[in-house]
Image (tube, grey):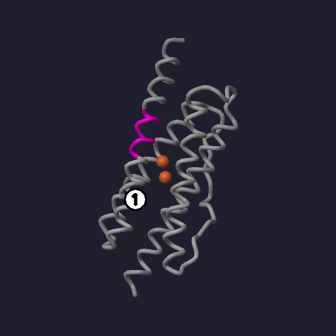
Amino acid sequence: MAEKDDMIRMLNDDLTGEIEAILVYMEAHFLMEDKHCPTSLAMLEIAMDEMRHVQWLAEEIAEMDADPELTPRKLRFAGRDLEAALERAVGLETGAIAQYEAHIAAISDAGVRRMLAHIRDEEEDHHKQFVGLLAKVREAAADR
Ligand SMILES: [Fe+2]
Ligand SMILES: [Fe+2]
């Protein structure tokens, strides 16, 4: 059953990454002075998307009679700086996209591949949003 064990390990790794992203984005949201600025709202909204990903992954793992691993990685927060928070978010999304791509290539189960591809598409959308916000924040800083 090596293949099933490998699949569970990969899904748990994805799950851990999602939890890391949720906590980092929520921290960014809470630390921002203006909770209603576009970056702060995006952090909160995207954290909620990641929570849906946690649900999908955890349900899939539980269906395979394994335990979802909900312990976060050692967290590296970005602090109060808007630009640093967005750079961190872009990095997390870039890493997530690469990891989902690798897992889609390594897994043969069609249903799991479909779920991972759906999540990957959403991570690409998150990446695009964060890159756009980062460009705006840098532009505003340059105008000052
Ligand atoms: Fe996600
Ligand atoms: Fe994401």
Q: Which residue is drawn at 54% across and 43% down?
A: 46
The N terminus sits in image quarter: bottom left
Is residue 128 covered in magenta? yes
Q: Can residue 92 be seen in this view?
A: no
Majority secondary structure of magenta residues? helix
Residue 35 point in image, percent of width and height: 67, 30
Residue depicted at 39% across the width and 85% down the height: 2
Give the residue type that dot 1 points to: Gln
Residue 45 in the image, given as x and y percentages of width and height:
57, 40
Q: What stretch is highlighted in magenta?
A: 124-131
Relative to the observer, which residue lies in front, 71 or 77?
71
Q: Which of 114 and 75 is in front in this view?
A: 114
Tell me if I can see residue 17 in this picture: yes
Mark 1 surroundings: few (<14), some (14-19) or many (≥20) residues within 10 A? some
Q: Is residue 132 magenta?
A: no
Left/right placement of residue 105 relative to residue 11 reads left
- Report which residue position mark 1 lands on: 99
Q: In which quarter of the image is the C terminus?
A: top right
- Quarter where residue 16 is shown: bottom right
